[in-house]
Amino acid sequence: MASTKCPKCAAPVTFDTGTKFVKCSYCESQIFIDRSGAGFYYAVPFSVAEADAIGLFKRWAAGPARAKDLDKHAQIAGIRKQYFPVYMFKRDVKGREEVLVEPAGSTTLPGLHKLRIPAGDIKIFDEGFDIGGAELVKPDIEMLSYMDSLPGKAKEQALVYFPIWRMDYVFDQKRFEVVIDASTGEIFSANFPARSSTAYMVVAAAGFVAFALEGLLALSSLAVAASLMALTVVGIFAASYYVARRL
């Protein structure tokens, strides 16, 4: 048997070696046991339902940086409801409290190094917490591995299960993945089908050449050059509008 102090009430807590989770018999706090010591065990509830997550993805896919009609032609290949484990470190840095979040599980998913714990939404993870059928991803990174690189002095450390929607989609016969923060709706993507800039560059180059030639023409006939420049402006505007709408 091993023992530690409850981070909430400081009561002694005994547990079997190798145990990751234990409840304090005095204050009933759920405690996460790591080689670096004891910490609280929390979860953030889902605020974004599956249908809302798909809607957020569609709006994101319609953005100007994404491929044309990605929102219409992307085929969702799968969506998974998960609780992903992260470590939350509250640190006193020169008299100011900072909250740092680091992954507690090995992952290549995008954005999981940028998660932010929403203030006021964190809940104690105990038997009464409803995970709503979500998959619990097990932590496999020791909290201790982050301790030496953290600034300031420790105030609190905790394991927090963070809600995410993990979505796979197919576009142009290629598979992509996004992570949707199920507390704020923020979307993370390591790579996505990008809109080609070639057409915009062609329009810009054509406009530059036209204006350059018209500038030379203005040396001999200002009125004719001005008329042609006006037509060029209209033409560039029309071409740009077409590219934005169609390509």
Image (spheres, helix red, strand yellow):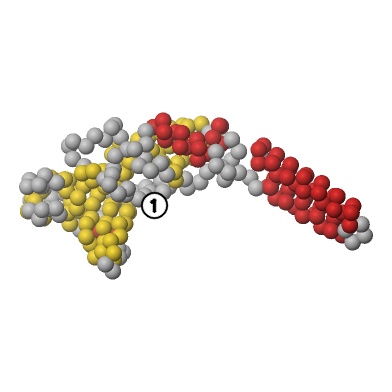
How many residues crowd mark 1 within 10 Å: few (<14), some (14–19), many (20+)?
Answer: few
Say which of 137 and 60 sits in front.
60
- The residue that appears at 41% across and 41% down in the rendered structure is 185
Q: Quadrant of residue 43?
A: top left
**Residue farthest toward the bottom in the current orientation of the protein:** 94
167 up-or-down from 26: above or below: above
- Residue at (46%, 37%) from the top-left corner? 56
Instruction: Give the residue type at disc 1.
Output: Lys
Question: Looking at this view, is 100 or 148 the one in front?
Answer: 100
Q: Which residue is mark 1?
A: 114
Residue under the image location 37 percent in, 36 percent down:
48
Q: Position of residue 75 (x, y in %)?
A: 51, 31
Q: Measured along the vertical axis of the image, is residue 185 above or below residue 91?
A: above
Task: Residue at the far right: name it.
Answer: 220
Q: Is residue 194 left or right of residue 165?
A: right
Residue 104 % position (x, y): 30, 50
